[in-house]
Image (cartoon, helix red, strand yellow):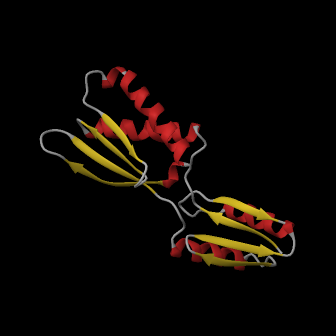
Amino acid sequence: MASFDIVNKVDAQLLDNAINVARKEIINRFDFNGSKTEITLDKKDMSVHITTENEMRVNSITDVIRQRMIKQQLNPLCLDFEKDHYASGVMVKKDIKVKEGIDKDVARKIIKDIKDSKLKVQAQMMDDQVRVTAKKIDDLQAVIALMRQGSYDLPLQFVNMKG
């Protein structure tokens, strides 16, 4: 039986590279000259912390981070923008959580879409991923094409293809 897994994983090194390049770009930008802006990546929590003076700068920083992630072939849909946290004084703090794994609701939607396609495959939920098995690799490739057309509000990767 041929199989593959549908997952949502973020390469920590590529994310680190994207954040470092974004940090360097912000430091060199004229509109951020003399600002007290800080961007940090917490690899344990997989979260990005932004501290700066105002909301406009926070929005600019998030745009730069999105652009840098795209250039690193990371999908910015994996970012979960939490509410702004206002620190004492005029500093604005923002936490961006990196979503990994497929939650149960999205996994159910994926499995339902696969079953509705009438392909001769079986899909099952396994922790935070979905495993798809079939007799023919062509059916698995059809499922991958179907998943790429769907909108699940998170980036999907297809790994462990076994034929």
Q: Position of residue 3 (x, y in %)?
A: 77, 70
Of residues 23 and 145, the one nearer the viewer is 23
Q: Quadrant of residue 34?
A: top left
Decide: is 38 above or below 115: above
Q: Residue at x 55, y 70 (%)?
A: 128
Decide: is 104 above or below 79: below
Q: Position of residue 120 (x, y in %)?
A: 81, 78
Q: Give the tally of numbered discs.
A: 0
Of residues 46 and 155, the one nearer the viewer is 46
Question: In which quadrant of the rendered image does the N terminus lie?
Answer: bottom right
Q: Position of residue 69 (x, y in %)?
A: 53, 41
Residue situated furthest left in the rendering: 89
Q: Position of residue 131 (x, y in %)?
A: 68, 72
Q: Residue at x 70, y 74 (%)?
A: 114
Decide: is 24 above or below 155: above
Q: Residue at x 63, y 72 (%)?
A: 110
Of residues 78 and 42, the one nearer the viewer is 42
Q: Residue at x 26, y 45 (%)?
A: 93
Residue 33 falls left or right of residue 2: left
Residue 91 falls left or right of residue 47: left
Question: In which quadrant of the rendered image does the C terminus lie?
Answer: bottom right
